[in-house]
Image (cartoon, grey):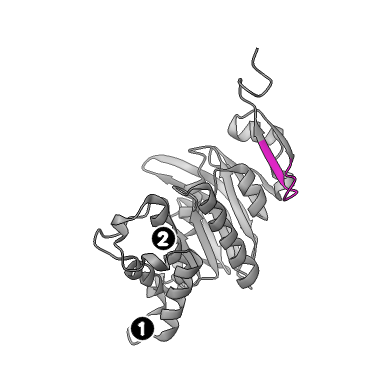
């Protein structure tokens, strides 16, 4: 099981002249699934970029096992933390097998060549994401949902203790959304991986995450278990969305029911 400490201390992140995340501090629970939720432009993806050190802090720091991630060697960090960003781009001619194989690069070195263990990691990632039958196809020729699953396979092949995923269910049909989230739970429960992901669908975040971080205007509004975070008042405060929150009859987790003007009992 992953027992790495992942701490954010006074972190400020931004682009050009604007601060997006402001003086944010939190501890990411080790060995758990954390979902970052919030409205568009709340700073969710920016925070994830800071955790992965794709974005340098303007103030504060991200600490992995007490070491600032921006002081770590790239190879050392890549063997511990895997990232699936929003809308990743692959060379137009690359095949699925080659792309997923690139997830093994952090495990290579100047004198280490490809091994049967690398083959096994790639095969397992392809099988877990249902993409083994696509291995010879060009990534550019795939549908959006297929491409997303292939990118997830590449991240899995990296075989890190910590996975950061920015909207991993983007472009996926509902059945594949559930498959991907079920897969992440398997990785967490069976292999002890710490998972941090940005999700838009609140009810799915409640069902699949152990810990929620709700953001607004670059700051954490509240964090805790789904029951603690997802209440009708907090959803309205964070998302400007009037809603009812009931108990999901299947999972026992909060289920958000938006209240629009039509077909919600509010129309007159």
Q: Nearer the viewer, residue 144 or 40?
A: 144
Report the residue marked by disc 1: 114
Q: Give whichever of discs 2 and 1 has the lower sequence position.
A: 1
On screen, residue 27 versus residue 138, left or right, reads: right
Which of the two residues, 136 or 73, is positioned nearer the viewer here?
136
The residue nearer to you, when weighing 20 against 235, is: 235
Nearer the observer, 265 or 224: 265
Residue at disc 1, secondary structure: loop
* Residue 37 in sight from this viewpoint: yes
Q: Residue furthest top?
A: 268
Q: Please identify the quarter of the rendering in which residue 101 is found.
A: bottom left
Secondary-structure class at tag 2: helix
Measured as percent of width and height from the top left, residue 252 is found at 75, 48
* Residue 97 sits above or below residue 176 on the image: below
Q: Residue at x 61, y 30 (%)?
A: 241
Q: Residue 238 falls in which quadrant of the image?
A: top right
Please rate how many residues cluster around mark 1, counting C-alpha atoms within 10 Å: few if below 14, some from 14 to 19, many from 20: few
Q: Which residue is mark 2?
A: 151
Checking the image for residue 257, the label placed there is none
Specify start and end residues of the magenta stretch as a single range: 247-256
On screen, residue 31 above or below 88: below
- Left or right of 253, for residue 239: left
Magenta stretch: includes residue 56: no
- Residue contact at pointers 2 and 1, CB within 8 angstroms: no
For label 2, the crowd category at 10 Å Cα-Cα, with few meaning under 14, some 14 to 19 and many 20 or more, is many
- Tell me, yes or no, if residue 77 can be seen here: no
**Quadrant, the C terminus:** top right
At a point 47% along the width and 42% down the height, the residue shown is 20
Q: Is residue 102 left or right of residue 10?
A: left
């Amino acid at each position: 099981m992953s027992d790495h400490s992942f701490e954010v201390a006074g972190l400020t992140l931004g682009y050009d002249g604007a601060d997006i995340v402001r003086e944010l501090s939190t501890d990411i629970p080790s060995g758990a699934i954390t979902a970052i939720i919030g409205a568009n432009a709340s700073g969710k993806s920016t925070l994830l970029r800071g955790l992965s050190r794709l974005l340098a802090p303007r103030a504060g720091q991200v600490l992995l096992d007490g070491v600032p991630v921006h002081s770590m060697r790239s190879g050392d960090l890549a063997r511990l933390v895997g990232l699936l960003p929003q809308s990743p781009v692959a060379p137009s001619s690359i095949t699925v097998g080659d792309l997923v194989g690139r997830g093994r690069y952090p495990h290579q070195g100047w004198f280490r060549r490809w091994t049967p263990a690398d083959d096994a990691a790639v095969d397992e990632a392809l099988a877990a994401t249902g993409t083994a039958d696509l291995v010879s196809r060009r990534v550019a020729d795939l549908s959006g949902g297929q491409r997303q699953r292939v990118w997830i396979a590449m991240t899995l092949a990296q075989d890190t203790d910590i996975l950061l995923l920015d909207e991993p269910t983007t472009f996926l049909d509902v059945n594949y959304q559930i498959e991907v989230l079920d897969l992440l739970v398997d990785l967490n429960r069976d292999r002890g991986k710490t998972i941090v992901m940005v999700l838009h669908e609140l009810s799915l975040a409640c069902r699949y995450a152990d810990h929620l971080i709700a953001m607004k205007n670059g700051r954490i509004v509240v964090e805790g278990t789904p029951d603690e975070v997802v209440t009708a008042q907090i959803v309205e405060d964070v998302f400007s969305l009037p809603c009812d929150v009931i108990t999901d009859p299947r999972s026992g987790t909060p289920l958000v029911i938006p209240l629009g003007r039509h077909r919600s009992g509010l129309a007159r």
